[in-house]
């Protein structure tokens, strides 16, 4: 899991969000989240996303460099899975100061900020 320290949190989060700045990469990540922790082969992932070959490889490399996915070999196949810990850390970064400017300053990080 990628943790965001206070010194580099904004910079690291920006780099991670940049990796999601493509509709295709967001689609790939969503497909991997749906596949669950066991992941899915690149071939099946390509079929599910409608992206294949070098284009899919490029998007997977970008997501892996951002720490949002993990890849492992299984025989002759490469299995990809979402790194839900990293995704959760990114979400936590966004919500860390949720509602602190509300009257009373209470954070509603674990609750509904619209209460």
Image (cartoon, helix red, strand yellow):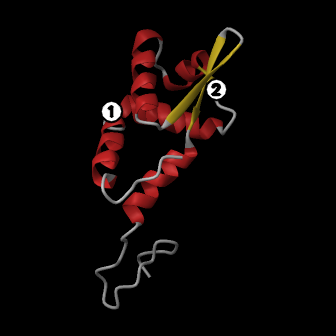
Q: What element carries label 1?
A: loop
Q: In this view, does 87 lie above or below 45?
A: below
State the residue at coordinates (54%, 46%).
1
Dot placed on the residue nearer the N-terminal end, 2 or 1:
1
In space, the residues marked 2 and 1 are separated at their CA atoms by 21 Å
State the residue at coordinates (45%, 33%).
27
Q: Specify the farthest residue to the front.
A: 7
Looking at the image, which is closer to me, 1 or 44?
1
Looking at the image, which is closer to me, 22 or 82?
82
Looking at the image, which is closer to me, 67 or 87?
67
Write down the residue under mark 2: 40
State the residue at coordinates (59%, 15%).
43
Q: Is residue 73 left or right of residue 107?
A: right
Q: Where is residue 101 shown, x and y percent of the image?
A: 28, 80
Write down the residue under mark 1: 22
Local packing at callout 1 (Cα closer than 10 Å; few below 14, some 14-19, many 20+) is: few
């Amino acid at each position: 899991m990628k943790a965001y320290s206070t010194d580099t949190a904004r910079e690291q989060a920006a780099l991670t969000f940049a990796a999601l700045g493509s509709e295709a990469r967001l689609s790939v990540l969503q497909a991997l989240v749906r596949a669950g922790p066991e992941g899915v082969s690149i071939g099946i992932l390509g079929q599910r996303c409608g992206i294949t070959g070098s284009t899919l490889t490029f998007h997977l490399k970008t997501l892996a460099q951002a720490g949002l996915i993990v890849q492992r070999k299984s025989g002759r196949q490469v299995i990809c899975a979402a790194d839900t810990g990293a995704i959760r850390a990114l979400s936590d970064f966004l919500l860390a100061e949720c509602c602190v400017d509300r009257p009373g300053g209470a954070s509603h990080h674990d609750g509904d900020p619209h209460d």
